[in-house]
Image (cartoon, rainbow, N blue to C red):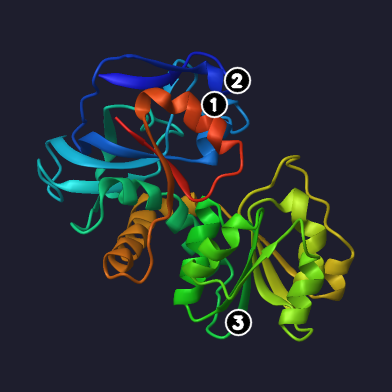
């Protein structure tokens, strides 16, 4: 089969499209013929060794995807050959999903609703459970609260906007360009604020009549924490989904004055079965039209380098690879 592997750590140029052996499933595993693969910041972090993992190069990278079951292990009864499934959680201690075929654990498999395309399923598989874990399991968002989603045009951000709205929250979001304003507001944000044009903290306070945001979903904490403290309501919670460019977070004295809650998270703490349960619920909501995957770019698997270059630039929605 063809796969994207790294033989050393580095930039997008270390991604190599090459022939490798097709894996075989163990007793409790499933072999998938992949039809679509999500491209995620964690993939780039693994590629550059900013997210150290037990499996050293050469290795296949990739976290999630969707495909068709082509073989099952002797202990597998939950799915059968021919089933269409989606999954997340590969690429840490195992070979990843940037390939024609991938082996996943039975607990990771979620039956794909027929109304979702493989590309839509792959675009949901990591970012939607991440956003759900941030909002529901860490922040415990309540109906009527105000949620600020930093980076509303990104993968996790666009998912968080929709999930927060479905939970009954009032949603505000930030975006990088004027072009993203309408798209993010269409997803459910009451206002999308261009961070280079307005004072985000002051504008959030104005829009909430001085109250501030009860919850902030923060994908780049080291870059935005000072703004978050201005935008946050007393007793509010900031959920750190990502640390940002420097990876170093300065906690301001203002946090104490606000009774602020600074919450860190990893959706992997839900476990494989827990994450799959969350994904199944969200996929059902997408099939019902309550929310949707946001796809920005679809590229052939062979163009994974280009996908990672785009990942480092401004882009709207998810980048998806197709074998």
Position in image of residue 209 (x %, y %): 76, 86
**Mark sitting earlier along the chain (3/2):** 2
| Residue 76: quadrant of the picture | top left
Q: CA distance from mark 3 to mark 2?
A: 42 Å
**Mark sitting earlier along the chain (1/2):** 2
Per the image, the residue denoted by label 1 is 47
Position in image of residue 323 (x %, y %): 29, 30
Per the image, the residue denoted by label 2 is 10
* Residue 292 visible in this rendered orientation of the protein: yes
How busy is the neighbourhood of tag 3: few (under 14 within 10 Å), some, or many (20 plus)? some
Q: Secondary structure at mark 3?
A: loop
| Residue 235: quadrant of the picture | bottom right
Residue 143 has which mark?
A: none
Q: Secondary structure at mark 1?
A: helix
Look at the numbered discs 1 and 2 and tell me whether their residues touch, using CB distance below 8 Å.
yes
Look at the numbered discs 1 and 3 and tell me whether their residues touch, using CB distance below 8 Å.
no
Location of the N terminus by quadrant is top left
Q: Secondary structure at mark 2?
A: loop
Q: Residue at x 52, y 66 (%)?
A: 161
Residue 145 has which mark?
A: 3
Position in image of residue 104 (x %, y %): 29, 38
Q: CA distance from mark 1 to mark 2?
A: 6 Å
Horizontal relation, residue 58 to residue 30: left or right: right
Q: CA distance from mark 1 to mark 3?
A: 38 Å
* Residue 73 visible in this rendered orientation of the protein: no
Q: Residue at x 50, y 34 (%)?
A: 43
How busy is the neighbourhood of tag 1: few (under 14 within 10 Å), some, or many (20 plus)? many
Number of dots carrying numbers: 3
Relative to 128, is 322 above or below? above
How busy is the neighbourhood of tag 2: few (under 14 within 10 Å), some, or many (20 plus)? some
In this view, the residue in front, 118 or 96, is: 118
């Amino acid at each position: 089969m063809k796969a994207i592997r790294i033989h050393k750590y580095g930039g997008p140029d270390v991604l190599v499209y090459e022939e490798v052996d097709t894996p075989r499933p163990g007793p409790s595993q499933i072999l998938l013929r992949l039809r679509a693969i999500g491209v995620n910041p964690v993939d780039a972090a693994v590629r550059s060794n900013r997210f150290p993992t037990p499996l050293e190069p050469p290795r296949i990278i990739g976290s999630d995807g969707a495909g068709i079951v082509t073989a099952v292990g002797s202990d597998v009864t939950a799915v059968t050959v021919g089933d269409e499934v989606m999954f997340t959680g590969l690429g840490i201690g195992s070979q990843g999903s940037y390939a024609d075929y991938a082996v996943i654990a039975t607990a990771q498999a979620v039956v794909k609703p027929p109304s979702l395309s493989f590309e839509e399923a792959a675009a949901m598989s990591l970012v939607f459970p991440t956003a759900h874990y941030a909002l529901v399991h860490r922040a415990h968002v309540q109906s009527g609260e105000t949620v600020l989603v930093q980076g509303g045009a990104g993968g996790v951000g666009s998912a968080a906007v929709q999930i927060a709205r479905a939970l009954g929250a009032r949603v505000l979001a930030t975006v990088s360009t004027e072009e993203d304003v309408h798209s993010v507001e269409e997803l459910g944000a009451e206002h999308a604020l261009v961070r280079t044009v307005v004072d985000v903290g002051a504008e959030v306070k104005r829009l909430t009549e001085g109250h501030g945001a009860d919850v902030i979903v923060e994908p780049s904490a080291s870059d935005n924490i000072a703004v978050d403290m201005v935008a946050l309501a007393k007793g509010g919670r900031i959920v750190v989904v990502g640390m940002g460019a420097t990876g170093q977070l300065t906690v301001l004295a203002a946090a104490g004055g606000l009774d602020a809650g600074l919450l860190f998270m990893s959706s992997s703490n839900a476990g494989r079965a827990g994450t799959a349960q969350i994904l199944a619920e969200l996929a059902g909501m997408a099939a019902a039209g309550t929310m949707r995957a946001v796809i920005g770019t679809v590229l052939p698997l062979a163009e994974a380098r280009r996908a990672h270059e785009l990942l480092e630039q401004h882009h709207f929605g998810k980048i998806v690879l197709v074998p």
